[in-house]
Amino acid sequence: MDGRVRPGVVCAPSSRWAKRAPDQRNINALTGDRLTDFGGGPTFYSCLVQVERSGD
């Protein structure tokens, strides 16, 4: 892999502390707290997002 993100995919390599966000949430809100029933691993799923340019 070359590290590039494929078109149509959003990559979030880091996030801010939830307590510093206006709504007290960060990207970790997109993953569930439950574990898989086979092996006890983390659960993942797809999320539809809308990306907009920030006011930098």
Image (spheres, grey):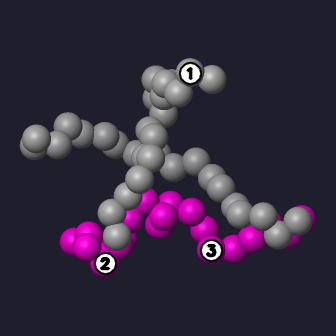
Residue at image point 53% right, 27% down: 3
- Callout in the foreground (2, 3): 2
Q: Residue at x 71, y 63 (%)?
A: 42
Q: Is residue 31 above or below residue 3?
A: below
- The numbered mark, 2 or 3, whose residue comes first in the sequence reads 2
**Residue 51 shown left or right of residue 30 in the figure:** left
Q: Position of residue 47 (x, y in %)?
A: 51, 49
Q: Which residues are magenta?
A: 18-38
Residue 49 in magenta? no
Q: Which residue is mark 2?
A: 19
Query: Which of 27 and 2 lies nearest the eye of the viewer?
Result: 2
Q: Dot 2: what SS?
A: helix
The residue lying furthest to the front in this view is 2
Sequence-wise, the earlier of marks 2 and 1 is 1
Q: Residues within 10 Å of mark 2 (few under 14, many from 20)?
A: few
In this view of the protein, which residue sits in the foreground, 4 or 33?
4
Would you say 19 lies left or right of 29 here?
left
**Residue at (35% x, 72% y) in the render:** 18
Checking the image for residue 42, the label placed there is none
Give the residue pinned by disc 3.
33
Q: Nearer the viewer, mark 3 or mark 1?
A: 1
Q: Circles 2 and 3: CB distance less than 8 Å? A: no
SS type, badge 3: loop
Q: Amino acid at mark 3?
A: Asp
**Could you give the CA–CA distance between mark 2 and mark 1, rounded to whole angstroms?**
34 Å
Place residue 11 in its image quadrant.
top left
> For the residues marked 2 and 3, what is the alpha-carbon distance in whole angstroms?
18 Å
Asked if residue 47 lies left or right of residue 42, the reply is left
- On the image, numbered disc 1 is attached to which residue? 2
Q: CA gap, disc 3 to disc 1?
A: 31 Å
